[in-house]
Image (spheres, rainbow, N blue to C red):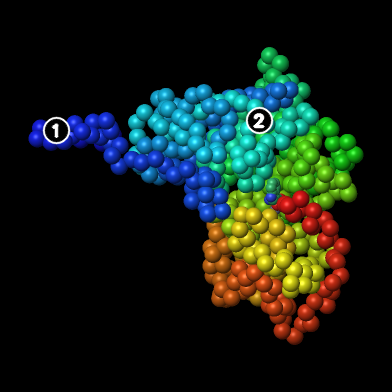
Amino acid sequence: MHRRIIAPGALAAASLMLAIPASAASHSPGAPGIGDPYYPAYGNGGYDVSHYDLRLKYQPATDELSGTATILAKMTQDLSSFDLDFLLDVSEVRVNGAKASFTTSGQHELVVTPKKPLDKGTSITVVVRYSGVPSTKSAYGFSTWHRTPDGAVAADEPEAAWWWYPSNDHPLDKATYDVSVAVPNGTQAISNGTLQSTRSQLGSTRYNWRQNKPQATYLTTLAVGKFDITTSTSEGGVPVVNAYSKDLGDNDGAARASIERTGELVDWLSGYFGPYPFNSAGGYVPNTTTGYALETQTRVYYSPKQFANGANSSLVVHELAHQWYGDSVSLKGWKNIWLNEGFASYAQWLWSEHEGEGTTQELADYVYASHPADDPFWTVKPGDPGPDHQFDDAVYDRGALAIQALRNAVGDDAFFAILKGWPQEHAYGNASIADFQAYAEKVSGKSLGALFDVWLFQPVKPASGALAKSAGEAFAKSAGVQPRSWKKIVAAHGAH
Ligand code: TRP
Ligand code: ZN
């Protein structure tokens, strides 16, 4: 608290200002967005969350979600009010124990005005009491809350949080989580991290999940339904928790034949990317009708459809690669999506080579040859695709191609040192493509500006020379021949 002593002579002038608390003079409303040009209203300004505690109750029959979110945050500005991103109905907000006033604004803003202005550098506790039927809420005309016959799922990118908890919804503000959800007996609630405990009482069971490492808001997931849960530990010591809807029908076997390999694949990826960054791994398959997977932290979301043609270990490799590239090291802004999708795709290329279904060079040659120069594929810049093209094929395929070009330019020793060093360099943090280029230049001792520009930032097909392994090597011996792994690789693309 700043108190002002007012000299008697100044009283008349000061009385004009009495409507504003003395300490509020320098305090202003927090911005309704964190400043990402792709999504100007996503996230908020003026504070940084360190922890979310969500204590919820969900009714599958009616889609009613209710409970309390307790948010710990630190002020990064002097604020008179701040926003949270949220769509459900709020009945009470408290800031540091005192009732705050609140209102809604824009597409998904909850504007909170605390009784006392908040000073930069101080810590606050925000309690939001809420309820609502998420499937009745939309923003910008869409909803990403997925109802299933036996429950619901929150798993989408970049928007998933608004339908189930209030947040500073941008990967720049990562936090730890306790997610506690009570559901009717016989129904399970799945979330990220470790299952700390369950407790049954009066017909309902409460699942207490904990994520003890920083997690982006869109990587925080909730699934309620009837699941079969399996647990194991990988050979390398990573605990694995998977969950399968009891309703997967003919896809059940292929889903398990893919996802039960999580431990093996986490260990295999650790060989390239370094130690697994989290204390739990796994995936879940609810009975949703979506067609995508999502790298929700420690507990990957998979759609049943993705197993219609049999098991897909390549898809599991893609999602697990994101645990290092995307989850532990998150992007600084959505334009840096290549740091997520390019590397997760390249992990699939490495897996293809390991499985004898096409080398990374063969895959690179194939992608290069299968898109002629006038194919619009080349107009998408993987290094800055724009919000409407964030998950285009080019971000994945040209993105991985760029990584092969990098590998050929710096050589295998430097390349694999970069691949393993980067997740350590920025573990649990955020980074940009510029940060990655600087790191690759430091490790390789090479100047890489031209290479990054050609492969990531130009809307045209690069000359093939940059892709050839060495000057003498004939380019694209195998180009035009589809590697055997290809169909499984593209099945991991987001835009289905
Ligand atoms: N990031 C996801 C993956 O690579 C794919 C994805 C892209 C996605 N856009 C999405 C998932 C939208 C859900 C919603 O696995
Ligand atoms: Zn991906």
Q: Is residue 12 above or below residue 159?
A: above
Label 2 belongs to which residue? Answer: 136
Q: Place residue 385 in its image quadrant.
A: bottom right
In x, y percent, where is residue 121? Answer: 37, 42
Residue 53, image x and y in percent? 55, 32
Q: Quadrant of residue 384?
A: bottom right
- 127 over 314 or under it: above or below: above
Q: Tell me the element at label 1.
A: helix
Which quarter of the rendered picture does the N terminus lie within? top left
For the question of whether residue 1 can be seen, the reply is yes
Horizontal side of residue 237 vs 444, given as left or right: right
Question: Marks 1 and 2: CB-CB under 8 Å?
Answer: no
Residue 326 placement, left or right of 80: right
**Residue drawn 49% across and 48% down?**
34
* Residue placed under numbered mark 1 in the picture: 12
User: Residue 167 bears which disc, if any?
Assistant: none
Label 1 residue near ligand 1, CB within 8 Å: no
Can you name the residue that lies furthest to the right here? Answer: 250
1 or 2: tag closer to the N-terminus: 1
**Is disc 2 placed on a helix, strand or loop?**
helix
Q: Nearer the viewer, residue 343 or 24?
A: 24
- The residue located at (23%, 34%) in the rendering is 17
**Image coords of residue 187 (percent x, y):** 75, 25
Q: Nearer the viewer, residue 147 or 444?
A: 147
Q: Quadrant of residue 392?
A: bottom right
Q: CA distance from mark 1 to mark 2?
A: 54 Å
